[in-house]
C-alpha cells in the first residue's frame, strides 16, 4: 500500500504475538483450537488483507461477547428511531434486557413522542401452541390507540416466532392498511446468522423493502442535503456530529438511526450524499441508495481531531468552494481548542497502551483518537465484524499487534495478562473481569455512561474519561499493604 | 417504488409542540387510564424478565459452577449483562450458541461441543445447564442429550450437570431460579441421604434475592445464634467479590459437598415461598429434618418471626443482642414515623419482596396505595390482601395483579402517591410524577452499591427508614421556599 506509515510498538513483534496466541490456543480441546486459530493473528498492516477470519459461528461453550440478530435489530438499528413503537414480538425477556441498555439518547417525551419503552407481546405457552398472529393484530391496534403520535410500529421477531411459523409479514401488511400507518415486520429471530450482524443486515433490508421512498421531504431539495448514517447517538453523539456538519454548511436531513425519525429516514432517497459512520451496521442501505438512487456514500471517522480534520476535508472534496471554505474555517476554529485538550491530557497519557475489543467501527475508528493523546493501541478486535472491517483495521493498527475476532473471555484474559495494557476498552461483560485484575477499563459500547465521544464536542469528554480511567488514584489501593 | 405496505407516499410531517402538549396531558387522564387498563394483548414495561435469568442467578450461587445456556448465544449475553449492570461484577456464563441448523437438527451437537469446550477451558466442578426459547420450542431432550454426552466422552461420566427447562414463555425469572435450584440440589444430594445422619445444620435459601447485603445479614444472624448453617445458592461472594488485583472466575458460592450433605440437615428454611415453591415441595419429600417456608424477614414483625423460628428450631433463645438491635430499629421507626405516617406509596416487584415492602410500610403507618405485580398469582393476591386488611393503613390499598409499569404510570398519574418502591425501571414514572423512587428491588442499573446494603432483619428496617425519610427531608429542603428553609427537620 502506498503512503501507509507502518506504526510500531516497542517490544511487540510478530513472534511475540504469535507465541502469546499459541499459548492461549493450547488450552482448547483440539476441535475448538482448530476453529479458533484462524481468528487470532499478529497484524500485518501492509498485507492489504484482513489477517483474521471472521463472521463465522461462535464455537459452543466459550464465553463469547456476541449477541444475536434480534439484538442487532432491536438494540442497534430500530431502537434508536424515536418516533416508532418497537414491539418485541415473542416472550418477555428479549425486550426487557434491551430496554434502556444501549444509551441511544433521543429527543421527545417518553410515551408521547418518543417510545423508549419495553413493548412486547409477552408470549405465553398458548401463543407458542396456537400462534401469535391474532394477538399481534390486537396488539397493533392497542399500540396505535395508546400512542397516537407514533409514526409507525416495528414488529421485531424473537426466536419462537420464526420457529412456530407465524406470518408477521402478512399481519403487518393487513394492519398497515387497516390502521393507515406503517407497520414494519422485521424477521430478526435471534437464531439467525452468527451474531448481531445479521440483525443489522435484515433490518437494512427491511428499511429497503418497507420504509425508504415512502415519504418525500416537505421542502425543496438543496445542494448540501446529506444524511448521517450509522450514528446511533450513544451518549449524544449525533448531537455532536450533526451541528458540526451544519456548521460546515450541510443540511442534515436525516439521521440513521440515532435520535432518528421514521419519516425522515423514509425520504432519505432524496439526499445528495450519505455520510456513513458505522459501516458494519449500515453499509447495506448505503449501497442500496447508491445503486438505486445514485447517492454516493462516504465513510468518515469523527473520533479525535486528526481523524475529524481528515474526514471533514474528505467530505468537502465532494462539494463546491462554499463548503470547502467553510470546512477550512471550521477546522481553523477548532484546531486550537483541540490542541488545548491534547496539551492538557497528553503529558499524563503519553506512551500508555490500550487494548480494544468492541463492535461496529470502534476497534478501528478510535485508534486515531488514542494516538492524538499519545497512546498506542496494542490489540484490537470485533465481536461481529466481517473481512471488510478487518481490511479497514489492519492499516490503522501497529505492526504485529494482536488481532482477535469473536474473542472469548478466556483469550482476552490471557492476552491482558501477557501484554499488561494500561487500559482495556470493551463491554460491560468484560469490564469487571479486568477491573478485578486491577486494570483500568472503559466501556466502549456505551461510553461507560458518559459521552458524547464523537466530533469536536466529544473529544474533550473522551480525553477526560481516558485520563480519569487510567490515572484514578483508586487503582493504587488495589493491593493491601498487609 | 419500494413501498411494500400499499400505503400512499406522503410528505414528511413533524410532531408539533401542540400535539405533544395535548397528548402529554391526555396520557395522565382517567380516560387514558381506562383505555390503558382495557389492553388485552400489548404489554408495556413489564417489571419481570424471563426464566433463564433466574436460573443463571441460582447457578452462580454454587462454588466452581459454570452457568451454561442451552440456546442462542444472544440470550446468554443478555442475562450476563443484566447481572453485570446490577452488581457491577463479572458474571461468567457460556452458551452453546445454537443457530438455524439447530432448528432443523436439534441442539445436541451444540450441547456436546459446548460441554467439552466449557469443561476444558473454564475448569468448573459443575456445569448448570438451562434453556432459552429455541430448544424449548423445538423440544430438545436434555436428559437424553446429557446422557449421550457422558456416553460419548464429551464430559467425564460422573461430572455434575444439573439441568433445568426454563422456557421464557412461561413464568418469570423467579420461576427459572426455582427450577434451576431444584435441579442443582437434586444433582448434588443424589445418593447423599444417609439414614439416621443429621448434620445439625440449618439449610437456608434466600430465593431470587439480588441483594448481597441481605446474604451477609442472614449469615451474621446465624452466627450470632451460633447456628451452624449451609447457605444454599449463596451469591454473596460471587457478586460482591473483593478487588485485590486477581480475577477469579468462581469467587464464591455454596461448597458442593456441603450442599450435597444438606439433605441430612436439621432444619431447611426458605424465606422465599414464591421463588422456591417447587424446590420446597421437593425438599419436603426428600430432606431430613424440619422444613420451614416463611416470608422474607422485612419489617419488624417478620424479622421477629424469623428470629423466633430460628430459636425454636435449634432450641436456643434469641440472643440478647437482637433484643437490643430490635430496640434500635424500633427507635429509628418511632423517631422517624412522622416523616412516613400517612404517606402513600406505589409498590411493585417480585412476590416475596412485595410482601415485605407492604408489611414494612404498614408498620410505619405509611400507606401501600398501589400494589402491583407483573407476574403474580392468586396466592400472592390473597396474602397481600390479608396484610392490607389487617391494618387501618391498608384500607385504600389496591392490588393489581399481572399488570405492568405502564398501568402503574396511569395509576400514579390519576391517583397520586408520594413515592414508589421498585427497581430502576420505575424511574420514568417517578420522574413524570415528580416523586422519589426507592430502589429496593432488582435490577438497579443507575445507582452504586445499593445491592450491598441489607433490607432484611432489623438492620434492614433501619436502612429502609433512613433511605426513605432522608429522601423526603431532602425534597423538603430542596423545594421549600426560603421562609420555610429551616435548620431542623
Image (cartoon, grey):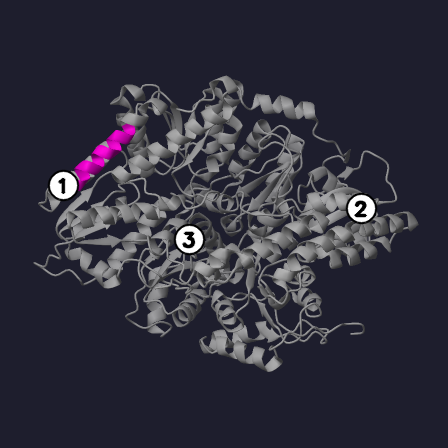
Left or right of B130 on screen, residue A298? right
Left or right of A381 on screen, residue A276? right
Tag 2 residue: A226
Tag 1 residue: B318
Q: Quadrant of the N terminus of chain B?
A: top right
Residue, x 65% and y 46% (percent of image)?
A: A233
* Residue placed most toward the observer, A455 or A238: A455
Taking the image as drawn, is residue B1 in sight?
no
Cβ–Cβ below 8 Å for labels 2 and 1?
A: no
Cβ–Cβ below 8 Å for labels 3 and 2?
A: no
Q: Are marks 2 and 1 on the same chain?
A: no
Subunit that carries the residue with mark 3: B
- Check if residue B130 falls in the magenta segment: no
Point out the stretch of residues depicted in magenta.
Answer: B318-333
Point out the tag, 1 or 3, that comes first from the N-terminus: 3
Of the two numbered discs 3 and 2 in the rendering, the one whose residue sits closer to the viewer: 2
* Residue placed most toward the observer, B488 or B143: B488
How far across and down, in percent of the image, does residue B425 sit? 47, 38
Subunit that carries the residue with mark 2: A
Amino acid at each position: 500500500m502506498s503512503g501507509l506509515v507502518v506504526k510500531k510498538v516497542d517490544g511487540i513483534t510478530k513472534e511475540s504475538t504469535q507465541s502469546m496466541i499459541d499459548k492461549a490456543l493450547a488450552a482448547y480441546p483440539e476441535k475448538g483450537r482448530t476453529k479458533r486459530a484462524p481468528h487470532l493473528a499478529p497484524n500485518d498492516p501492509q498485507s492489504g488483507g484482513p489477517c483474521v477470519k471472521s463472521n463465522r459461528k461462535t464455537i459452543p461453550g466459550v464465553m463469547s461477547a456476541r449477541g444475536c440478530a434480534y439484538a442487532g435489530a432491536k438494540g442497534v438499528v430500530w431502537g434508536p428511531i424515536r418516533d416508532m413503537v418497537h414491539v418485541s414480538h415473542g416472550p418477555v425477556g428479549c425486550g426487557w434486557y434491551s430496554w434502556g441498555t444501549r444509551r441511544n439518547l433521543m429527543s421527545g417525551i417518553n410515551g408521547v413522542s418518543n417510545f423508549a419503552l419495553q413493548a412486547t407481546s409477552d408470549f405465553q405457552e398458548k401463543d407458542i401452541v396456537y400462534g401469535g398472529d391474532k394477538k399481534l393484530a390486537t396488539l397493533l391496534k392497542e399500540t396505535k390507540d395508546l400512542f397516537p403520535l407514533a409514526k409507525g410500529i416495528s414488529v421485531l421477531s424473537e426466536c419462537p416466532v420464526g420457529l412456530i411459523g407465524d406470518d408477521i409479514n402478512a399481519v403487518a401488511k393487513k394492519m398497515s392498511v387497516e390502521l393507515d400507518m406503517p407497520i414494519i415486520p422485521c424477521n430478526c429471530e435471534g437464531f439467525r446468522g452468527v451474531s448481531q450482524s445479521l440483525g443489522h443486515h435484515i433490518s437494512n433490508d427491511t428499511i429497503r423493502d418497507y420504509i425508504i421512498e415512502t415519504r418525500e421531504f416537505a421542502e425543496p431539495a438543496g445542494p448540501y442535503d446529506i444524511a448521517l448514517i450509522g450514528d446511533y447517538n450513544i451518549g449524544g453523539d449525533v448531537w455532536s456530529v450533526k451541528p458540526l456538519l451544519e456548521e460546515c454548511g450541510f443540511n442534515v436531513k436525516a439521521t440513521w438511526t440515532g435520535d432518528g425519525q421514521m419519516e425522515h429516514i423514509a425520504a432519505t432517497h432524496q439526499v445528495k450524499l450519505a455520510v456513513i459512520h458505522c459501516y458494519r451496521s449500515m453499509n447495506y442501505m448505503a449501497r442500496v441508495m447508491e445503486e438505486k438512487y445514485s447517492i454516493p456514500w462516504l465513510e468518515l471517522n469523527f473520533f479525535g481531531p486528526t481523524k475529524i480534520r481528515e474526514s471533514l476535508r474528505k467530505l468537502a472534496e465532494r462539494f463546491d468552494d462554499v463548503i470547502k471554505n467553510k470546512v477550512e474555517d471550521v477546522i481553523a476554529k477548532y484546531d486550537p481548542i483541540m490542541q488545548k485538550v491534547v496539551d492538557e491530557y497528553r503529558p499524563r497519557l503519553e506512551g500508555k497502551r490500550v487494548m480494544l475489543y468492541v463492535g461496529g467501527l470502534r476497534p478501528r475508528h478510535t485508534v486515531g483518537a488514542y494516538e492524538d493523546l499519545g497512546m498506542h493501541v496494542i490489540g484490537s478486535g470485533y465481536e461481529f465484524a466481517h473481512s471488510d472491517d478487518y481490511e479497514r483495521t489492519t492499516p490503522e493498527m501497529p505492526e504485529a499487534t494482536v488481532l482477535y475476532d469473536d474473542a472469548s473471555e478466556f483469550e482476552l484474559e490471557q492476552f491482558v495478562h501477557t501484554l499488561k495494557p494500561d487500559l482495556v476498552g470493551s463491554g460491560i461483560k468484560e469490564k469487571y473481569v479486568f477491573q478485578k485484575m486491577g486494570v483500568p477499563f472503559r466501556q466502549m459500547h456505551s461510553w461507560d455512561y458518559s459521552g458524547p465521544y464523537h466530533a469536536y464536542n466529544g473529544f474533550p469528554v473522551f480525553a477526560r474519561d481516558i485520563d480519569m480511567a487510567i490515572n484514578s488514584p483508586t487503582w493504587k489501593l488495589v493491593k493491601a499493604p498487609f | 417504488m419500494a413501498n411494500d405496505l400499499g400505503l400512499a407516499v406522503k410528505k414528511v410531517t413533524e410532531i408539533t409542540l401542540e400535539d405533544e402538549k395535548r397528548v402529554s396531558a391526555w396520557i395522565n387522564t382517567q380516560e387514558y387510564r381506562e383505555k390503558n387498563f382495557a389492553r388485552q394483548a400489548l404489554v408495556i414495561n413489564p417489571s419481570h424478565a424471563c426464566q433463564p435469568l433466574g436460573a443463571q442467578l441460582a447457578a452462580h450461587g454454587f462454588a466452581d459452577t459454570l452457568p451454561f445456556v442451552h440456546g442462542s448465544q444472544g440470550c446468554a449475553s443478555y442475562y450476563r449483562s443484566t447481572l453485570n449492570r446490577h452488581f457491577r461484577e463479572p458474571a461468567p456464563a457460556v452458551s452453546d450458541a445454537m443457530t438455524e441448523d439447530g432448528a432443523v437438527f436439534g441442539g445436541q451437537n451444540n450441547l456436546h461441543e459446548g460441554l467439552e469446550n466449557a469443561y476444558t477451558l473454564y475448569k468448573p466442578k459443575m456445569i448448570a445447564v438451562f434453556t432459552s426459547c429455541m430448544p424449548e420450542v423445538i423440544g430438545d431432550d436434555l436428559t437424553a442429550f446429557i446422557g449421550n454426552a457422558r456416553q460419548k466422552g464429551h464430559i467425564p461420566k460422573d461430572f455434575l450437570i444439573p439441568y433445568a427447562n426454563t422456557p421464557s414463555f412461561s413464568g418469570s425469572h423467579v420461576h427459572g431460579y426455582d427450577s434451576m435450584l431444584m435441579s442443582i440440589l437434586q444433582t448434588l444430594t443424589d445418593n447423599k441421604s444417609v439414614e439416621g445422619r443429621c448434620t445439625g445444620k440449618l439449610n437456608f435459601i434466600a430465593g431470587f434475592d439480588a441483594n448481597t447485603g441481605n446474604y451477609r445479614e442472614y449469615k451474621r444472624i446465624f452466627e450470632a445464634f451460633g447456628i451452624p448453617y449451609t447457605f444454599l445458592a449463596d451469591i454473596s461472594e460471587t457478586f460482591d467479590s473483593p478487588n485485590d488485583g486477581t480475577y477469579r472466575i468462581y469467587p464464591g458460592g455454596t461448597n458442593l459437598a456441603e450442599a450435597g450433605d444438606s439433605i441430612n440437615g436439621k432444619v431447611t428454611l426458605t424465606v422465599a415461598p414464591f421463588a422456591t415453591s417447587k424446590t420446597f415441595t421437593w425438599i419436603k419429600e426428600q430432606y431430613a429434618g424440619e422444613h420451614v417456608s416463611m416470608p422474607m424477614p422485612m419489617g419488624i414483625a417478620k424479622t421477629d418471626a424469623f428470629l423466633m423460628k430460628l430459636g425454636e428450631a435449634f432450641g436456643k433463645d434469641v440472643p440478647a443482642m437482637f433484643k437490643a438491635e430490635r430496640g434500635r430499629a424500633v427507635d429509628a421507626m418511632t423517631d422517624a414515623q412522622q416523616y412516613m405516617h400517612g404517606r402513600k406509596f406505589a409498590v411493585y416487584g417480585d412476590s416475596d419482596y412485595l410482601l415485605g415492602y407492604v408489611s414494612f410500610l404498614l408498620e410505619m403507618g405509611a400507606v401501600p396505595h398501589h400494589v402491583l405485580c407483573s407476574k403474580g398469582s392468586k396466592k400472592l393476591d390473597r396474602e397481600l390482601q390479608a396484610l392490607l386488611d389487617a391494618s387501618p393503613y391498608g384500607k385504600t390499598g389496591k392490588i393489581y395483579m399481572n399488570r405492568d409499569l405502564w398501568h402503574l404510570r396511569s395509576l400514579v398519574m390519576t391517583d397520586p402517591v408520594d413515592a414508589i418502591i421498585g427497581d430502576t425501571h420505575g424511574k420514568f414514572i417517578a420522574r413524570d410524577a415528580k416523586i422519589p423512587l426507592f430502589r429496593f428491588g432488582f435490577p438497579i442499573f443507575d445507582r452504586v452499591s445499593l445491592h450491598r446494603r441489607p433490607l432484611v432483619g432489623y438492620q434492614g428496617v433501619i436502612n429502609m427508614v433512613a433511605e426513605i425519610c432522608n429522601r423526603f427531608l431532602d425534597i423538603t429542603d430542596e423545594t421549600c421556599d426560603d421562609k420555610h428553609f429551616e435548620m431542623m427537620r
